Amino acid sequence: MLNMIVSGASGRMGSRIIILSSDSEEIKLTGALERKDHRYLGKDIGDVIGIGAVGISITDKVKNITEKADVLVDFSSPSATIECLKSLSGKPMPVVIGTTGFSKDEIEYIRLYAQNTPCVFAPNMSVGVNLLLKILSDIAKVTQDDYDIEIVEAHHRLKKDAPSGTAMKMAQVIASSLNRNLEETAVYARHGLIGERTKKEIGIQTIRAGDIVGEHTVIFGGLGERIEITHKASSRDTFARGALKAAQWVRKQTPGLYDMQDVLGLK
Ligand code: NAD
């Protein structure tokens, strides 16, 4: 049995993870973490997310709930994740981090934390997107600089970071296959008299509308042809199932930073 804490427990992702885990005989929820001023602090998480009482009260104090837990699954916000890891650093616990939008320094802190305990950190936990990351790298190695690369991502209106962590990961995978530095080659917006497209730029464009769960298209535009690869998520459950798979996988690993490709055996 895997005892699990979920941080961001009443959010869109946290609640799906808890709902899906309630059907599992291998995973047991032992803690539900939320932010300090959350209106449901002290309430039973099961009642809050509509599955009936599960005997776990929502808390903002991670230290009070670590004793019985094997793993913490985090889908909150970058500052909340770092704050939580800092609280755990005295007695590091395996973590699965699905949160996106971290700064360079915050990512460095996650790396540091993972030196002492296994940690899965992935901006997209779906099987489909992780397969796509593998394919993108293979395509880029063949098309090289002859094809222009553009990434377009679309998400719901409530998403806070842009471009999505998935679009950035796709761009990083392609850039590293092409030996390009993403910081120098990424172009996030175009407007006005911009001149001709430079050969090595990687365009990353963002759409925010309605309730789109998550869509990513990567274009490799050549002369006389173009390859377009699209992934569309139609339900958050694809990410939630991936997170639960990662939670079961991570506790059996040695300390280190892993991603979903490791969990799915795609490396
Ligand atoms: P959301 O806003 O619905 O949920 C976030 C939850 O975190 C909220 O309930 C919020 O109250 C809570 N929170 C804020 N501060 C906290 C703190 N200090 N401690 C504990 N909880 C705190 O957002 P969401 O759609 O569930 O997404 C959460 C994160 O997961 C985002 O960064 C999003 O981009 C990312 N995400 C990742 C994947 C993936 O596959 N890796 C998939 C979907 C979303």
Image (spheres, rainbow, N blue to C red):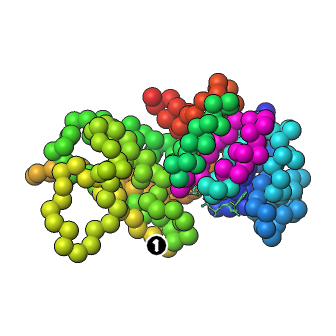
Q: Position of residue 244 (x, y in %)?
A: 65, 42
Q: Which residues are magenta?
A: 81-102
Residue 266 vs 131, above or below: the answer is above
Q: Position of residue 153 (x, y in %)?
A: 40, 60
Quadrant of the snapshot with the C terminus: top left
Q: Position of residue 108 (x, y in %)?
A: 56, 42
Q: Quadrant of residue 93?
A: top right
Q: Quadrant of residue 53?
A: bottom right
Residue 166 vs 252, above or below: the answer is below
User: Residue at point 70% right, 45% down?
Assistant: 85
* Residue 100 among those drawn in magenta: yes
User: Residue at point 83% right, 41% down?
Assistant: 66
Quadrant of the rendered image holding ligand 1: bottom right
Residue under label 1, please give it: 209
Q: Position of residue 31 (x, y in %)?
A: 81, 48
User: Residue at point 68% right, 31% down?
Assistant: 117
